Image: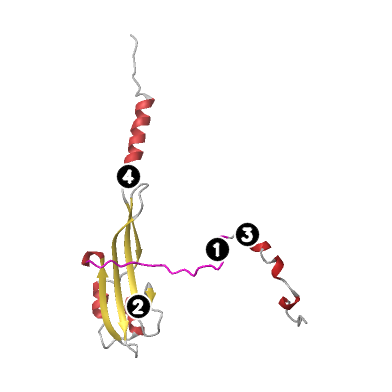
Amino acid sequence: MVKVTIKPQPVFKTLAFGAFLAVMACSPIFKNHGYIPPAEDLAEIKVGVDTRDSVLETLGAPSSSGVLRDSGYYYVASRVRYRGPKRPKVVSRELVAVSFDQRGVVRNIERFGLEDGYVVVLERRVTDSSVQNKGFLRQLLGNIGNFGPANIPGIDGT
């Protein structure tokens, strides 16, 4: 008697593996960025009583702070969904703003988010370069005619 064993075809295994990879590639991946203090910690901050130092001690370092000396601390957290080759989408963003008066005492605590109808746009400010549309060689060779003895430090040029 001859025993016959049937092996699954390699094509079926390859197709099943390919389908598994396609499903896994389309499943969303969520990444969290930033930090928002918990509600319990925010409740400990008393308006008109706490100072900049006590806020730092209670809530931790802010994500960013205002440019001006008397402006506030900003805690920002974002949740971004990545799905395959599609562009990442911000699904939630929260901002907690702690503002201070001239003496450095807490004046107000506000919370903003996408669910409240507030779109908090985070903008990166980058200083533009004065060099535009010039390649390396053009920049290097562009100064050939602009050099003279007056440009050398320590020489009068007269």
Q: Amino acid at mark 3?
A: Phe
Residue for badge 2: 73
Disc nearest the viewer among 4 and 1? 1
Disc nearest the viewer among 2 and 3? 3
Q: Which one is in front, 127 or 116?
A: 127
Answer whether labels 4 and 1 touch (C-beta < 8 Å).
no
Residue 30, disc: none
Q: Secondary structure beneath disc 1?
A: loop
Quadrant where the N terminus is found in the figure: top left
Answer whether labels 2 and 1 touch (C-beta < 8 Å).
no
Disc nearest the viewer among 2 and 1? 1
Measuring from the top left, give residue 147's x and y in whole percent: 72, 71
Q: Secondary structure beneath disc 2?
A: strand
Q: CA distance from mark 4 to mark 2?
A: 38 Å
Residue 29, placed above or below residue 59? above
Residue 126, placed above or below residue 57? above
Q: In terms of sequence position, does the residue under pointer 4 or pointer 3 come before the other?
A: 4
Quarter of the image where one finds residue 42: bottom left
Q: Is residue 119 magenta?
A: yes
Q: In terms of sequence position, does the residue under pointer 4 or pointer 1 come before the other?
A: 4
Q: Amino acid at mark 2?
A: Tyr
Quadrant where the C terminus is found in the figure: bottom right
Q: Amino acid at mark 4?
A: Cys
Q: Which residues are magenta?
A: 117-133
Q: Is residue 152 magenta?
A: no
Image point 34% across, 80% down: which residue?
A: 72
Q: Amino acid at mark 1?
A: Gln
Residue 26, disc: 4
Q: Residues within 10 Å of mark 1 (few under 14, many from 20)?
A: few
Answer whether labels 1 and 3 touch (C-beta < 8 Å).
no
Image point 25% across, 73% down: which residue?
A: 111
